Amino acid sequence: MTDKLDGGCACGAVRYRLGSAPLFVHCCHCRDCQRQTGSAFVINALIETDRIALLSGSPVPVAMPTDSGRPHDIHRCPACQTAMWSDYGRRPALRFVRVGTLDDPAALPPDVHIFTRSKLPWVALPPTAPAFDVYYDVKALWPAASLERRRAILG
Ligand SMILES: [Zn+2]
Ligand SMILES: [Zn+2]
């Protein structure tokens, strides 16, 4: 993997490298993600926090209001405010890395589309892509190796 999974913010102050492939990649079409990105969806690569090597800079957490009431902190570049990754539910060992910040965002295509009930009507998904109105059964979709890694950090 190494430098194939490098990324950074818009101004260049924050640079990072993912130490391995992620656990799973979400494309989320919920209203929160649409508002927070100003776009149609967000693409999040779920990965253990200790597999994100900061090469420069230090993102700062910003607490977001959510429809669900569950805590959501977006970690942003302190200089240009680019959203680098999220912490959903204040779980320090797990990060949701914004795939659009990778130097090569095509490296991590979505494994699942979620909250498609609010998907914008002109977004066409590949017919074979797993897609769910709301959320999905992690144990049914994740590869065994990812479930094992998840157990190691979340129990
Ligand atoms: Zn920046
Ligand atoms: Zn969302």
Image (cartoon, rainbow, N blue to C red):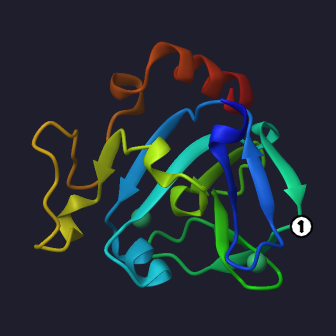
Q: Is residue 23 above or below residue 41?
A: above
- Where residue 10 appears, as percent x and y from the top left, is 67, 77
- Where residue 12 appears, as percent x and y from the top left, is 77, 72
Q: Amino acid at mark 1?
A: Gly
- Disc 1 packing (10 Å; few <14; some 14–19; many ≥20): some
Q: Is residue 121 above or below residue 113?
A: below
- Where residue 102 appears, as percent x and y from the top left, is 60, 56
Q: Residue at x 42, y 85 (%)?
A: 38
Q: Which residue is mark 1?
A: 57
Q: Residue at x 39, y 44 (%)?
A: 109
Does the image show residue 106?
A: yes
User: Which corner quadrant holds the N terminus?
Assistant: top right
Q: Residue at x 64, y 22 (%)?
A: 149
Dividing the picture into quadrants, the one containing residue 72 is bottom right
Closer to the camera, 122 or 117? 122
Number of marks: 1
Disc 1, SS: loop
Q: Residue at x 34, y 68 (%)?
A: 30
138 lies left or right of 95: left
User: Which corner quadrant holds the C terminus?
Assistant: top right
Where ligand 2 lies, by quadrant?
A: bottom left
Closer to the camera, 77 or 32? 77
Q: Is residue 79 above or below residue 147?
A: below
Whether label 1 lies within 8 Å of ligand 1 gets the answer yes
Dividing the picture into quadrants, the one containing residue 129 is top left
